[in-house]
Image (cartoon, grey):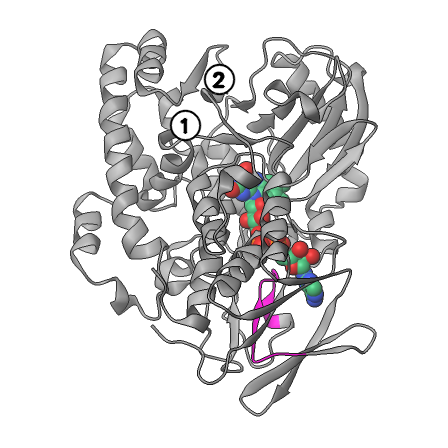
Amino acid sequence: MRTVPGATDRVVVIGAGLAGLATALRLRGAGREVTVVERGPGPGGRAGVLERDGYVLDTGPSVFTAPELVADTLAAVGERLEDRLELVPLETTYRAQFADGSHLDVHADVDAFAAGVEALAGPAEAAALRRYLADLAELYRLQLRTFIDRNLDTPLDLLGPELWALARRGGFGRLSSHVARFFDDDRLRRLFSFQALYAGVSPFRAIAAYAVIAQLDIGAGVWHPVGGIGAVPRAMAAAAADAGVVFRYGATVEQLDVRGRRVTGVCLEGGERLPADAVVVTTDVPERLVPGFSRRRPTYSPSCVTLHLGVRDELPGQAHHTISFGAAWQQVFDELTRDGRPMSDPSLLVSMPSRTDRSLAPDGGQVLSVVAPAPNLDPHSGGNPHIDWDALTPRYREEVLGTLEARGWTGLSDAIEVEHVDTPLTWARQGMAAGTPFALAHTFGQTGPFRTPTLPRRGPENVVLAGSSVQPGVGVPMVVISGRLAAERITGPVR
Ligand SMILES: Cc1cc2nc3c(=O)[nH]c(=O)nc-3n(C[C@H](O)[C@H](O)[C@H](O)COP(=O)(O)OP(=O)(O)OC[C@H]3O[C@@H](n4cnc5c(N)ncnc54)[C@H](O)[C@@H]3O)c2cc1C
C-alpha cells in the first residue's frame, strides 16, 4: 500500500461528515495533531438534522447499518460506542409493501422472516430465503476482505483465492439474474435487488456482487440511534473533541497552499491559513480543491427527492421503515438511469423513526422521511439537466403524497405541520456533482480498484481523499470505512 511520504504530524481534515469524523478519530488515535475544518455550523454533512416545532427530522440517511464500524472507529481513541450512543435494534428491518396489496415484514430474526415468507409465498420460497441469506453472508465475507475493507492501488491487488471464490459464486453475473436463480416470486426478487439503487445502478445492470448491500441491512440488521441518525456524527465529533481534535466550524477551505509536490497548509475564506503536513479532503468533488487531481468523466448515481414531514397524526399500523413498491419495476430503473424522467409509478422508502423513538416528535405526532429516487442532472449519467425542479416540486410533492395516501398512509397530507423538501437542485446548490447526494455510481468501472483510491496518483503527494466519491463507496458504512483507509495512507496500516 502506498502511503504519504515525509512528515505527517499535523493533519487538516476538510469536512466533518461521517468520513471526515472517522478519519479524524483514526488519526488522533494514532497520535496525529488533527484539525477538522467544516463549512457548516456543526458535524454531520449529508447526515443532517432539522429541528422545527418539536419535530426532529433527519435530512440524510435513515437506514443505519453496521454499527460495529462506528464502534471500531470510536475505539481508536479508547472510547466505547455504548458510552456515546444509544442504539435500538429494529426487530422489523423493513416492511415491504407490494403493489398487489400484500406485504412482508423483514425480520432480523431469520426464523420469523422465513415464517413470513412462507405465509406470503409458500415453503419453497422460505427454503430459498434461508439458502439466499447464507449465500449473502458468504459473499459479504469474501468481498469485505477483497474489495471493501482495504486500500486498493491496482486491480492486481484483488488477485487471490477470494476473487476466484467470488467469480465461482457468480459474483460477476447480473444481480437480477443472480436473485432470480434463488427466488421464483417476483416480490422477493424485488426485495433482494432494490438495494442496487443504493449503489447507484439498476439491478438489471449491476453485477451480482452488489447483492451484498442486502447483507448490510436485511442480513445483518438495522439499528435506530436514539435522537435520530444525527446523533451518530454528534457522538463521533464529541469523542474526537474530547480526544483533542480541534474543530473549526463555519470555516470554508478556499484552496490548498501547494509548494512543489506538497501541500503546506489550507487557506480559509477570509484569508486565514492553517499549516499542515498532510491534508485529507472529504468533499464531494475533490477535484475542485486538489490541484492536479482529475478523473475521467464519472458516471453518477441517480439522485432523489426527499420529503421530510412532521405530522400531527399517530399513523397507526405503519412500520419504522417501509419500502413501498409500485407495480412497475424495470421501467423504474430505465426512467431513473437511462431516460432522465421521474418515476411514473414510484417505489418509495418511507421511514418513520418516531415509531421507535418518541424523542423525535411531539405527543400525538410522527416524523416521516420519504425518499423518492429521481434522475440526476447529468445527461452522461442518464440524468436530465432540463427538469426544472423548482417549478415541478409542488406538483411532484402532491403526487408523492397522493401515492402514499393511496398506499395506506391515510390522512397524511392533512396532518402535516412541518415540512422540508429536497430535490436534485438542492444537492447541486450544495456543490454536489450532478445534483446527486449519492456520488459516483458503483458501476464496475467505478468500484474496487477502479474507483478513485484514497491516495490519488495525481496531485500533491500528501493529499489523501475520503468519503463517498472514493474507495470503497457510498453510504454510512462505506464512508466510515473510507475514513480508516484514508488515515492508514498517513499512518501506515493499523490493525
Ligand atoms: C437523502 C439521503 C438519504 C441517504 N440514505 C442513506 C441511508 O439510508 N443509509 C446510508 O448508509 N447512507 C445513506 N445516505 C448516504 C450517506 O448519507 C452519505 O454517503 C454519507 O453521509 C456521506 O458522508 P461524507 O462524509 O462522505 O460526505 P459529507 O457528509 O457530504 O461530508 C463532507 C463535508 O464537507 C464539507 N465541505 C464541503 N466543502 C467544504 C469546504 N470547501 N470547506 C470546508 N468544508 C467543506 C461539507 O459541508 C460536508 O459537511 C443518504 C444520503 C442522503 C442525502
Circles 1, 2 touching at the beta carbon (< 8 Å): yes
Observer-nearest of 86 and 315: 86
Q: Residue at x 54, y 74 (%)?
A: 294
229 versus 72 height, above or below: above
State which tag comes first along the sequence, 1 or 2.
2
- Amino acid type at circle 2 is Phe
Q: Quadrant of the N terminus?
A: bottom left
For residue 344, say whether it is visible.
yes
Q: Residue at x 28, y 9 (%)?
A: 122
Q: Tell how many labels.
A: 2
Q: Is residue 162 magenta?
A: no
Where does the magenta region start and end?
A: 275-287
Q: Is residue 282 magenta?
A: yes
Q: Residue at x 55, y 61 (%)?
A: 24
Residue 206 image point, x, y percent:
38, 45
| Residue identified by numbered label 2 | 98
Q: Residues within 10 Å of mark 1 (few under 14, many from 20)?
A: some
Residue 457 image point, x, y percent:
44, 78
Observer-nearest of 432 and 276: 276
SS at circle 1? helix
420 versus 98 height, above or below: below
Which image quadrant is residue 134 in?
Answer: top left
